[in-house]
Image (spheres, rainbow, N blue to C red):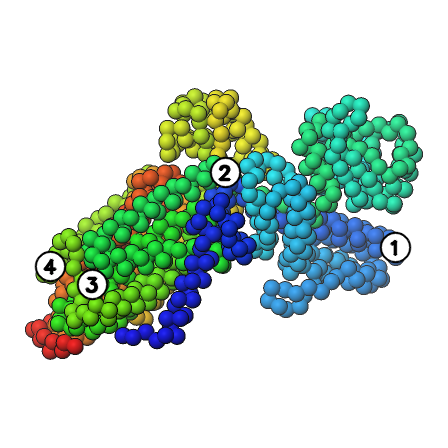
Amino acid sequence: MRTPKWQLAIYSLIILCGLIAALPNIIPQHRLAALPDWIAGQQVTLGLDLQGGSHLVLEVDAAALKQDRLTWLQDEIRTVLRGERVTGAAPRRQGDAIVVDAGDAATSDRIAPLLDGLISPVQAATFAPTTDILVRREGNRFTLTLSDAGIAERVDQAIDQSLEIVRQRVDQVGVAEPTIQRVGSDRILVQLPGLQDPTRLRELLGSTAQMSFHMVAREATGPGITVMSDEEGHQYPIEDRVALSGERLTDARAGFDQRTNEPIVSFRFDSVGTQRFAEITRQNVGHPFAIVLDGKVLSAPVIREPITGGSGQISGSFTVENSVVLSALLRAGALPAPLTVIEERTVGPDLGADVIEMGIVTGLAGFGLVMGLMVALYGGWGMIASGALFLNVVLTLGALSFLGATLTLPGIAGIILGIGIAVDANILINERIKEETARGRSAFAALDHGFSRAYSTIVDANVTSLIATALLFMFGSGPVRGFAITMMIGIVISMFTAVAVVRIAMTEIVRRRHMKTLVLRSPLRIAPGETRFAFMKARYLGIGMSIFLSLASIGLFMKPGLNYGIDFTGGIQAEIVTTGDVDLATLRSNLSELGLGEVTLQGIGGDNNVLVRLQRQEGGEAAQTRAIDLLRSTVATVDPGASVERTEVVGPKVSGELARNGVIAVVLASLAMLIYIWWRFEWYFAVGAIATLVLDTTKTVGFFALTGLDFNLTAIAALLTIIGYSVNDKVVVYDRMRENMRLYRQKSLREIIDMSINQVLVRCVFTSLTTFLAILPMAIWGGSAVENFAWPMVFGVVVATTSSIFIAAPILLILGDWAGGRPGRKAQQPEPAPAE
């Protein structure tokens, strides 16, 4: 039982490093200055849901990029044919292809090499070489289409270019500490802490900023003329031909007109642009000259005199903020393709501060309840487990700091849940030690056997939890990934604190006190003595009740159904805090008059909190921005002191992906656990666990339907955690069954199952109770922010524990009898293990 000194040194170094990394997150903010910079800078990064800010996901409009590419290809073919003086073969658009008809074979032979010169080699996803343009010749007709590999390469280039332009735009409006990164093949993630109004952000990032200068046509209509409007609705016949491209701009600055004091944007051209601008203004004195941005007329001033200095100004119905944004757009340059905002989440800093306070209070309450239970069960030995639990929380914070991970609201929930799960291992160990002591083993022998025999159960239980959280990380997004990271770190660290650290501490106490027998007495008589319940006599009742409840849950799932959150339905959601008790009727009446479609209001948290849901608006991103602006103005009219603390906008594409990923994660988690249990036990153990898991999962879905809680990404996190915990709980029972099947080879499977359940009944109840107590304060006081995670977890813990005893075991008996795995012979007890 002696621990080598080198091992103690490594353990001590791990703990020391973890404490140092966690220190900036534990001590008060005003004392950070006393720490060295390399320690003070190791604080955990708070997610936007905790510190407040805006989160947007932008997607490159591949369809628009493809159309631009086809237009370029048509113009390029026309230019090449004109340069080679090929007549009678003008290119024309035909769907997603460019068609060139040559009059005869000789002309076709001249055209073929010219078209081949437009083709560039690209690498396909299968790594096979191909070209960006596919040319098909049928007689004297050429059909040119864009290859999938070519489009993918263009999208990839557009993302890289857009990433830099978005970064420049954000930097130029002075947002501190932005996060701008590529996500997947065609998306950009933008996170801006502190920016509460996403309207400005949408305007800044969603605009392609393709600025150009056109002459206003002298005729109202005609070929080559497009009618465009300005912000005030005035219409202008604009010549399609670009007189001067915005690419010639070298600078743009916001300012004020010295005569009218109105906001303006001043611009300057490069040398080529200056020369061209002077030529245009010289030739068109007295005619209007339109400045067009993304298909909208910014202004159309009349040219009074030639402008030769290469500079000018844009005036109009600008606010100061509009002029700043426009100048930033023009300085950063045009995006190569439109970026669509497909997901937007904004949280106010006050709401984030409230969430942090809630996490600290409910976490301390959960820790206190778990610590109280451990002391009540094991007295002073329970204090050792509680100390290890505190160390687990501290090291988890240290690991998050060291890895640079972001702590989110679900991450706080993961830490609190981890408090209950981490101490499970100590209960398993302590109950094992009590068994070994009852067999007459000495203190060191009981300690050694207790840890070694509980170890495989602890490993199996934690692996099942890791499977669920790993899949949640793979298929989750945003804050839910933060939950998965926190849970995985907590589970791994608990293997160190609950096993290695506690073992050393207990061994040292036994050695220093020269204990002959290790007795884990509890101050209170909580645990019953040895039980001999015949659980299998009621097996059909247990399975029948479970099937009935699951069928009822399926019925609830069908009607009234789940209250799907915005993550899965798409649309707009806002959390409003009013100055007094919210008047839902008045607010609903005012919002219904806005013409935004179906409006749903739901009271949440206190009497002055309300959640507003709007359907996704028709008309693209501008329509979503308009809806949010109308919502804000209406709320301000109803209650001038009210504030919109949180807004979310999720597009149908994102909501569909989230729903699909959630289902995939649940299915893959179940399959992975089936394979793991099959590998570790027998096939009927695995099938029994999965059958029970299906019943547990359907009941949890029924709980969501019955309570009307939001079923969103956080709910999927709860569902996957329940799946992991349910299998975790069953592994404890299965592990004892496997052990007894090896010891008592002549006992029937029914006897083995009854004996095993009675032997682990106390530890199953207590391990579930610790998790229950850890999560209960968050469910009671956590409010709307975590209720769709905490309450299902409370329900799931109860369901998982009862199903391990009354459902999983009976299913295992039925499958085992069917498989003929155990003979029903008279019990033959083995020789008792010798005392050491």
Residue that numbered label 4 is attached to: 529
Q: CA distance from mark 3 to mark 4?
A: 12 Å
Marks 3/1: CA–CA distance:
89 Å
Callouts 3 and 1 close, C-beta under 8 Å: no
Query: What residue is rendered at 91% in x and 32% in y?
Result: 306
Q: Which residue is mark 3?
A: 431
Residue 203 placement, left or right of 675: right
Number of numbered discs on residues: 4
* Viewport quadrant of the C terminus: bottom left
Badge 1 amino acid: Gly
Cα distance between the residues tagged 2 and 1: 61 Å
Image mark for residue 83: 1
Answer with mark 3 or mark 4, whichever residue precedes in sequence: 3
Viewer-nearest of discs 1 and 4: 4
* Residue 98 percent location from the top left of the image: 73, 52
Looking at the rendered structure, the kind of residue marked 4 is Gly
Residue at position x 16%, y 64% from top?
Answer: 519
Q: Secondary structure at mark 3?
A: helix
Q: Tell me whether the residue at label 1 lies in contact with that at label 4, contact meaning CB atoms closer than 8 angstroms.
A: no
- For mark 2, give the secondary structure: helix
